[in-house]
Amino acid sequence: MSDDWQFEAGLATDKVTRGMDISDGQPSVSAGANWYPGNGFFAGASAGSFRFVGSSGTGVEAVLNGGYGWRLAGDWSAQAMLGHYQFIRGAHTTRFNYDELVLTAGWRDSVFASVALSPNTGFGPSPSSRAVAYDLVGRLPLVHGWTATAGI
């Protein structure tokens, strides 16, 4: 298997996406695969469970993304990514589908700051509109290829 491929599996006690609880306080599982050669183009796909407040079943949040990454001078990196979020199987899920452009700056592949811009974010009965979100994420390499991450 090429080192350009990264795979992830996750379990969360509650799933929050862009500030919105999308698992109704319930655990969420996820899995993903990314092709990332370091510099240049990259692509990825992931799927995670969700459950909207008051819904009777669990659905799937599918994410497809692609972009371009740069290694800058010293310990710095930058990335531009386009992503599409598709919610499958759930009440009114088409209201939650959205696209985004994410710009990220990274330091030593350990700390990342991002800003995400979306032209078509909608929550519940509100009309779709533009949205902006900010993230700060830390990444700590562990043993045997495992990594711990945390963010706000």
Image (tube, rainbow, N blue to C red):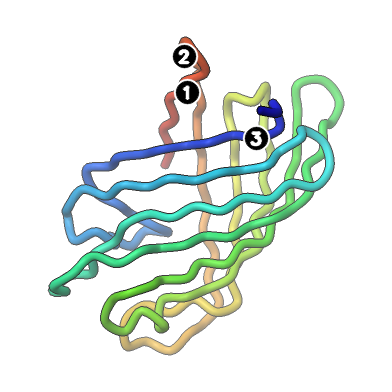
Q: Which residue is mark 3?
A: 5
Residue 20 occupies quadrant: bottom left
Decide: is 59 above or below 120. above
Residue drawn 40% across the image and 83% down it? 95
Relative image position of residue 52 (x, y in whole percent)? 23, 69
Q: Please give the residue where the numbered disc 2 appears in the rendered image.
A: 142
Q: Secondary structure at mark 3?
A: strand
Q: Residue flagged by tag 3: what amino acid is it?
A: Trp
Where is residue 125, by image quadrant?
bottom left
- 104 lies left or right of 56: right
Q: Is residue 120 left or right of residue 11?
A: right
- Measuring from the top left, give residue 75's x and y in whole percent: 75, 21
**Residue type (three-letter) at the residue carrying disc 2:** Leu
Q: Residue at x 32, y 74 (%)?
A: 89
Which of 79 and 67 lies nearest the eye of the viewer?
67
Q: CA distance from mark 1 to mark 2?
A: 5 Å
Q: CA distance from mark 1 to mark 3?
A: 15 Å
Question: Which residue corresponds to the image point at 18% horizontal and 69% vertical from the top-left?
Answer: 57
Checking the image for residue 40, the label placed there is: none
Kind of residue indicated by mark 1? Thr
Q: Earlier in the sequence, mark 1 or mark 3?
A: 3
Quadrant (top left, top right, bottom left, bottom right) of the C terminus: top left
Element type where label 2 sits in the image: loop
- The residue wearing badge 1 is 147
* Residue at x 47%, y 75% (from the top left corner): 97
Mark 3, residues whose alpha carbon is within 10 Å: few (<14), some, or many (≥20)?
some
